[in-house]
């Protein structure tokens, strides 16, 4: 996030794109609702009529996967009607001419055909957005989980820069992170192309620095594989061994049949986890880890805030902290690492090596933590990035972007769109929430959410068990007939192994991030005979 | 800002225009007791516990909802104030079942504290019989209506703080009750189990079901930590007795959550005690696994990795780190892959 959660409640206008906050980020949603009670305008762009859409001034029920077209048309209107922030664009950004040329190819009428939002409504929406400053834009996986995920993200940034909203309190472009420490795992360099603190592995100076710090004669310079490539590599033999730490790939990745085939193909699979999962079934060695409350350490939240995690209970049996397991393995492979606690790892290694976190030390994290960048030990942390439109990289860069449809669109055989996501009462594959007393009582099985119109078409009653089938698989789940879902759309989650949407989802990926298109594939539904 | 003053218990005291007597007094270090007042929200003036005497006013006024004016003379400790406060507390004690001995809230109850502070020695009035039965059937929250003092904090929290709009005042007069739509139990209503109502209830009317009998407040240690679920990073208090987490509450005034949690953050903590936890290293044997020592398991992994590096090179090994675990864990894993194995094949599910 460029901005902070503390801004939500004070915001004057909030634009939500592809984010169902009341279920996926519940506490964040309460601040959005507070803002609405305080008089803020709320615009919700989402195919589904979510809880927040019900509270919004405008709900824009665009078709799944039409985001770029719609946002281009909004920018088309902002430019044609001269409603954009000319001064900001001139002084803080670059690439406006190319952007303008591109979005002129997207008049509202064209976007209306693609998105299902009438041209006049698009014009109206653009004027509304330009009327209040600053506006805060938040998005989640509705934007990123597409083959054009990166383009969607850049479109959100384009829009906010054109409106002159980036770099101010209660403005900015704000992706809410789904998992407690995705931000942190990225910051720590658990990515194939960067060391901790986003220092590129193909930069010789960076490698030099880490070679010295880690006391090794060389470090690999070629960026590594992303997860989908690793999985493919298992089947081709390019990857012999896979080390899976804490992820339940067999349920979270698209097309479960295929994922399981990949895992099965591993010559050697190491899993490190707190529970046996669908993934650990394929392991050759299974290492028991300490859980959340059994460790000292840190998480980094969506707002770049490094927060302390503290030990409250002992790990069961022989289970050990994850950092200890890696240290022991390193030792057995000939390297003696000195840091012997999470605090030593952070204070003596990470913060020394990652410039944006150099000022963050455990001693400073006692209360509300610190938001990076905090380059020095007297730096107070950074609640808002790109302050006053002064972009970290110099100027904000507009990107001219074309719309492309999802990889798989409905046809005669598979006439409906399946989109997926999370629900309030469970988390991911339920390895944790499924084992908390009470949560299964509130949500005990997966459903296929569909509109009353489609239910009537197929003669399906609410609560009836139906089949949902894609080119990759079939599940049998109860139908949940709801007015939150528009005709033509089926919506499911991936919390339950049985009925998991990932038996159906399409393993196609954004070419840059290799994020899978969980938000769009084609399915058919049928009554059970 | 103005530098106006008023007289607080005879002392000249500064206040800001628009400030209520309660806030101005608190700012000056004088604590006026409250029950229904919910910081940051519009005062409702429901409980009258905060009554103070204002010179010239015929009756006592509620400090939480009366704005200060310049030159106002306020007494927070006059005999009239103390007597009235005591009477109010005595009436509240008699308004339902307040048998602290068996109440989950014992030791952390505003009413109990106030009864003590007011020097109440006996139950002056006969307690009214419990009108409505306890709601015990939803999975997380016990609603004991006989302990409810109708202060309205839960209603305000649900409607104005977290804006879930699940509860309101229902019925009238002595039949008054906090109700969901259609007066149904929580799990059959609009309630989303965020537990904000429990967080603000000053008495034992709303308590966490899973926390019952897990420890009295004076026996538990509060440990601050960060929620393990979504990327908001809510700050939590773990209430721990003998190394066991009994309940989780929100850290008030903390960034980012400012005293709020959701159902997962508040009630999703007991997975750590599941019998299904992995407790020892396991090594595959045929279709199943056998238990192994750390030495054996780690030696096996190290040997196998060395063998593969020899045979197929370091890039034949790949790793997926965990977006749920600690920063320090991810740091170690990427360091292991880069510095020990010698590959950049390290990723995590940054995308889900
Ligand atoms: S748990 Fe949350 S939603 Fe339910 S009544 Fe209490 S405050 Fe309202
Ligand atoms: S349940 Fe608690 S917070 Fe709600 S009105 Fe009763 S005493 Fe007050
Ligand atoms: S309490 Fe809820 S909203 Fe807050 S971090 Fe945890 S899961 Fe997210
Ligand atoms: S606290 Fe003032 S009336 Fe209740």
Image (cartoon, coloured by chain):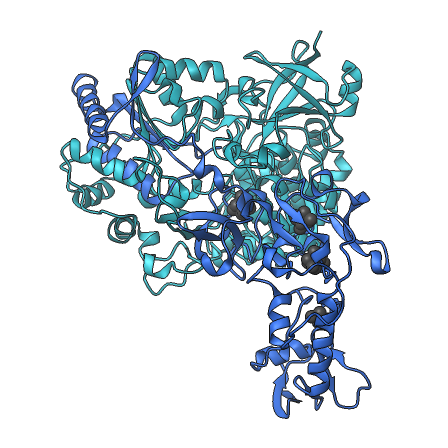
Chain colours: A cyan, B blue
The answer to whether A479 is drawn above or below residue B132 in the figure is: above
The answer to whether B342 is drawn above or below residue A477 in the figure is: below
Residue at 70% x, 12% y: name it: A526
Residue at 39% x, 26% y: name it: A227
x, y percent for residue A512 = 43, 30
Quadrant occupied by the C terminus of chain A: top right
Query: Which residue in the rendered view is the most extreme toward the right?
Result: B172
Q: Quadrant of ligand 4?
A: bottom right
Q: In which image quadrant can residue B263 be found?
A: top right
- Left or right: where A317 falls relative to A460: left
Front in this rendered view, residue A388 or A78: A388
Residue at 72% x, 63% y: name it: B151
The answer to whether A309 is drawn above or below residue A426 in the figure is: below
Residue at 69% x, 44% y: name it: B191
Front in this rendered view, residue A101 or A269: A269
- Left or right: where A332 falls relative to B102: left
x, y percent for residue A88 = 56, 55
């Amino acid at each position: 996030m460029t901005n902070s959660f503390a801004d939500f409640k004070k915001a004057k206008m909030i634009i939500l794109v592809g984010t169902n906050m009341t279920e996926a980020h519940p506490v964040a949603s309460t601040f959005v609702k507070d803002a609405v009670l305080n008089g803020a305008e709320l615009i919700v762009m989402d195919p589904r009529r979510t809880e927040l859409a019900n509270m919004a001034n405008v709900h824009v029920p665009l078709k799944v996967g039409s985001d770029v077209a719609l946002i281009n048309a909004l920018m088309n209107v902002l430019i044609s009607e001269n409603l954009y922030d000319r001064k900001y664009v001139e002084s803080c950004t670059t690439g406006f001419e190319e952007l303008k040329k591109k979005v002129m190819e997207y008049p509202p009428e064209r976007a209306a055909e693609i998105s299902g939002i009438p041209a006049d409504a698009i014009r109206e929406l653009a004027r509304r957005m330009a009327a209040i400053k600053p506006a805060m834009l938040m998005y989640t996986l509705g934007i990123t989980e597409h083959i054009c995920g990166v383009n969607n993200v850049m479109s959100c940034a384009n829009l906010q820069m054109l409106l002159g909203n980036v770099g101010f309190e209660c403005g900015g472009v704000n992706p809410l992170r789904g998992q407690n420490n995705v931000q942190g795992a990225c910051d720590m360099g658990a990515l194939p192309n960067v060391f901790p603190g986003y220092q590129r592995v193909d930069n010789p100076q960076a490698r030099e620095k880490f070679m010295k710090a880690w006391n090794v004669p060389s470090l690999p310079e070629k960026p590594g594989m992303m997860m989908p490539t690793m999985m493919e590599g298992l089947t081709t033999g390019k990857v012999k061994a896979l080390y899976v730490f804490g992820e339940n790939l067999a349920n979270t990745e698209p097309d479960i049949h295929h994922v399981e085939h990949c895992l099965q193909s591993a010559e050697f699979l190491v899993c490190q986890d707190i529970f046996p999962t669908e993934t650990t079934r394929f392991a050759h060695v299974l290492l028991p880890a300490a859980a959340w409350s059994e460790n000292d350490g840190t998480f980094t939240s969506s707002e770049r805030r490094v927060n302390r995690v503290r030990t409250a209970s002992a790990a069961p049996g022989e289970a050990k902290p994850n950092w200890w397991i890696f240290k022991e393995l390193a030792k057995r492979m000939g390297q003696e690492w000195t840091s012997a606690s999470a605090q030593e790892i952070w204070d003596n290694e990470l913060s020394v090596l990652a410039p944006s976190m150099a000022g963050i030390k455990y001693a400073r994290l006692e209360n509300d933590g610190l938001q990076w960048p905090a380059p020095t030990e007297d730096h107070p942390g950074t609640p808002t990035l790109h302050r006053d439109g002064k972009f970290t990289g110099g100027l904000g860069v507009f990107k001219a972007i074309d719309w492309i449809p999802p990889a798989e669109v409905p046809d005669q055989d598979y006439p409906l769109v399946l989109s997926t996501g999370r629900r309030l009462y469970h988390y991911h594959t339920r390895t944790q929430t499924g084992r908390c007393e009470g949560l299964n009582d509130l949500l005990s099985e997966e459903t296929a959410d569909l509109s009353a119109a489609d239910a009537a078409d197929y003669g399906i009653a609410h609560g009836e068990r139906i089949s949902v089938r894609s080119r990759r698989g079939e599940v049998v789940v109860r139908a949940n007939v709801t007015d939150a879902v528009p005709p033509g759309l089926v919506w499911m989650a991936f919390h339950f192994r049985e009925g998991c949407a990932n038996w159906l989802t399409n393993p196609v990926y954004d070419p840059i991030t290799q994020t899978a298109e969980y938000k769009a594939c084609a399915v058919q539904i049928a009554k059970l005979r | 800002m103005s530098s106006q003053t008023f007289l607080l218990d005879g002392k000249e005291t500064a206040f800001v225009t628009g400030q209520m007597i309660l806030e101005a007094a608190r700012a000056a270090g004088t604590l006026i007791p409250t029950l229904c007042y919910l910081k940051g929200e519009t005062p409702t003036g429901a409980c009258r516990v905060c009554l103070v005497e204002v010179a010239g006013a015929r009756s006592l006024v509620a400090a939480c909802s009366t704005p200060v004016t310049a030159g106002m003379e306020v007494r927070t400790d006059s005999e009239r104030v103390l007597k009235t406060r005591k009477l109010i507390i005595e009436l509240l004690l008699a308004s339902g079942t307040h048998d602290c001995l068996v109440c989950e809230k014992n030791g952390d109850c505003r009413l109990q504290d106030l009864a003590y502070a007011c020097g109440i020695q006996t139950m002056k009035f006969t307690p009214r019989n419990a009108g409505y039965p306890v709601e015990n059937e939803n999975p997380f929250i016990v609603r004991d209506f006989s302990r409810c003092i109708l202060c309205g904090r839960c209603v305000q929290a649900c409607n104005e703080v977290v804006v879930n709009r699940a509860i309101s005042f229902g019925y009238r007069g002595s039949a008054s009750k906090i109700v969901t739509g259609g007066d149904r139990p929580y799990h059959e209503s609009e309630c989303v189990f965020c537990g904000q109502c429990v967080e603000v209830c000053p008495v034992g009317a709303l308590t966490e079901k899973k926390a019952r009998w897990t420890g009295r407040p004076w026996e538990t240690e509060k440990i601050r930590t960060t929620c393990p679920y979504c990327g908001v990073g809510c700050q939590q208090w773990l209430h721990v007795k003998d190394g066991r987490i009994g309940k989780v509450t929100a850290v008030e005034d903390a960034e980012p959550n400012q005293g709020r949690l959701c159902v997962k953050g508040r009630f999703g903590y007991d997975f750590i005690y599941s019998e299904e936890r992995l407790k020892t290293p396991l090594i595959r044997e045929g279709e199943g696994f056998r238990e192994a020592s750390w030495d054996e398991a780690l030696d096996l992994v190290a040997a196998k990795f060395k063998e593969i590096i020899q045979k197929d090179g370091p890039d034949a090994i790949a790793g997926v780190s965990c977006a749920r675990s600690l920063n320090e864990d991810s740091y170690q894993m990427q360091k292991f892959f880069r510095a020990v194995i010698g590959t950049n094949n390290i990723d995590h599910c940054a995308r889900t």
